[in-house]
Amino acid sequence: MKQYQSSDIRNFSIVGHGDSGKTCLSEAMLKLGGEINRLGTIEDGSTTSDYHPGEKARQISIHATPLHMEWMEKKFNLIDTPGYSDFIGEATGALSVVDLALITIHAVNGVEVGTETMWNQATKLGIPKILVVNGLDREHTRFDEILAQARRRFGNNVFPMMFPVNAGLNYNQNVDVLRTELITYQTDGSGKMTEGELPDELIEKAKALHQELIEYVAESDDSLLEKFFEEGSLSEEEMRSGIHEAIQNQTFVPLFCTSATSNIGVARVCDFISKYGSSPDDRKSVTAHDEQGNEVQILLDGNDSVLQIFKTMAEAHSGELSLFRVYSGMVKTGNDFYNTDRNTHERIGQMFILNGKNKTQVDALYAGDIASVVKLKNTHMGNTLCSGKRVKLPSMNLPNPNIHAAIVPTAKGDEEKLAIGLATLHEEDPTFIYRVDSEVKQTIISGQGELHLTVTTERLKRRFGIDIELEKPKVPYRETILRNGAAKYRYKKQSGGAGQFAEVWMKIEPTQRGDGINFTHSLVGQNVDRVFVVSVEKGVKTACSDGILAGCKVVDLKIDFYDGKMHPVDSKDIAFQTAGKHAFREAFMSAQPCLLEPILDIEVTVPEEFMGDIMGDISGKRGKIMGMDADGKFQVIKAQVPQAELYHYATTVRSLTGGRGIHAESFSHYEKMPKEQEKRVVKERNSTNGEG
């Protein structure tokens, strides 16, 4: 296997909104690079990167898929990523290990929420971006409008390296601005092209853009700027040396025109990445932390090996594969490493470079490269492995889940299998989260959208053979009181032999939200032995966890056990537990009990035209609008909404905005429920608890 210098490697992720042609663009590149003989299609499930059963069935990308090829003696490690926000964790993980983001824009729909999200993610990670307007062979394409839109959203330095001559159904020509020439493509998918003179009517536009490009390039380098001021122009050679620098500091953001399905324009994108795209050399060091938490620099040409896992996946034939990037040193099969995230040792087994499901074995890998390794014992996504000084690379910044469901195995005895399956899937995809909620007595799974949960539960069934059902998660309501209350309760039981006796006098009062339960006693004199204080407290705690109004946890009150009576023979621990429990129940019911409901903070990001619909929907969900921010041409609506109203809210947002809105949610606080709602919940809960 040929070894590449780090300067000859191009690591990039193809990202963007769903259905903007990322998988087809990857396919076109692999065809140009000679890795495949013909272009696969999404429709017949024959593309290299969408090879999993769920991807073929749904005709969308679900997994980030690493691919590789050679172009102009450079090694391309490209990662095709999903565009649907349900699988945003895959795209985020892939972006965090590459040196360049190639962001696709749909030639009809223009800049969408997913385009924005990926742009922002790449910006946060500090990696350069190039834009590709794809699908220019469709009807109703709007190139000029989309260029203007991209400039409004991403900055006026978005610059067309080419523009289409005949966008639409017969599209086969672009003007190359760098070379000021006309390129005509064959429409047979081969990617072959001929270069020719510009027609008269395009010369002026092309020359003006070429001059603008020269100015951008000059701006990126002081010595070039000086030359530009002196001579008013730059030679082709000077342009070439300056473009790479201009891309690195994003003096301008290059934009290209393609139709991936016809392989038009793709070769020029490959040329550009090969000549001017980022290599690992452009980030010769990355910041990590040592065991004491101090910042340290990991050098590309360092002697110690450091690598990071950016994805783990289970493959039918080879078991678990961990995908990684080498940040320093080299990795050989049989090397020993230390996992600083889990404090365990790992030995590197067989390594492969991947093109979808096709694997090529490699024995050694050098700094800057990307590959996969067969099953590691205890290493997961985001973990750092190192051979020398113990260091930890920054963890991947993954989004919080925004949709939840309760999962129930339908067959008895499958609980253990389910626990193993859920843990495995979480390790493979950390944006899928599960927890056993003791308060509502359900196993809750959470993800990035309805499709994410559906796909993940299908994998659970397929891989672990568990029959499961999803149901609505119960809302963790809480019970509390609004005023002071008191009760005296006598418990007496005589059934032959030793009896049971306890009397408990109790006062309760409400406290601040979030204070929990505060149990105290103010006993004086000898009426009750202090040994029974613990017994009464146990009884009260049981009542608090069982709930009184509707079987929900009791919170935010102070209890004072201030007096009572006992019997020298018949008073026992269990008697005072029982009396304590009943005294508390009676005091609670006398103190204007009520239900509290969890309120969530939500942020909904939508194009401006959908604001009215979203705000109306929030009001209909008993929500309060807390404020609004503009984010480019998107609006971010901040609101507080009761959790009970937000079941499958991610789906509501998508349907109200034609798939262009996204939302995030987090817990805010508990507050008192409206009386009508409370009555309904109490009635529902008591009928399911068998008390109705």
Image (spheres, rainbow, N blue to C red):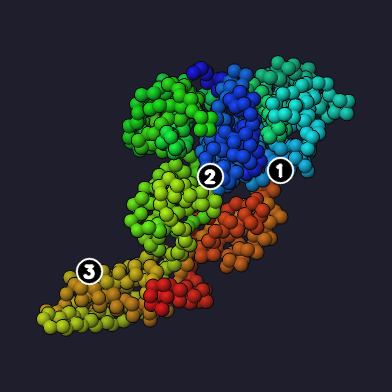
Judging from the image, what secondary structure is the residue with disc 1 in? Answer: loop
Q: Quadrant of residue 125?
A: top right
Image spot of residue 574 (x, y percent):
20, 73
Circle count: 3
Query: Which amino acid, mark 1?
Result: Gly
Which is nearer the N-term, disc 3 or disc 2? 2
Q: Residue 389 vs residue 580: left or right?
A: right
Q: Residue 149 vs residue 81: left or right?
A: right
* Residue 477 drawn above or below residue 202: below
* Crowd class of label 3 (few under 14; some 14 to 19; many from 20; radius 10 Å): some
Image spot of residue 64 (x, y percent):
53, 38
Asked if marks 3 and 2 touch (Cβ < 8 Å), the reply is: no
Q: Nearer the viewer, mark 3 or mark 2?
A: 2
Q: Which mark is residue 469?
A: none
Image spot of residue 534 (x, y percent):
22, 69
Q: Which is more toward the observer, 649 or 235?
A: 649
Say which residue label 2 marks: 54
Say which residue label 3 marks: 534
Q: Which is more toward the observer, 531 or 139?
A: 139
Q: Nearer the viewer, mark 3 or mark 1?
A: 1
Q: Residue 30 vs residue 382: left or right?
A: right
Q: Which mark is residue 110?
A: 1
Query: Which amino acid, mark 2?
Result: Gly
Extreme-front residue of the structure: 44
Judging from the image, what secondary structure is the residue with disc 3 in? Answer: helix
Which is nearer the N-term, disc 3 or disc 1? 1
Cα separation, mark 3 vs mark 1, equals 67 Å
Residue shown at 48% from the left, 62% from the top? 472
* Residue 494 drawn above or below residue 550: below
Residue shown at 15% from the left, 81% from the top? 499
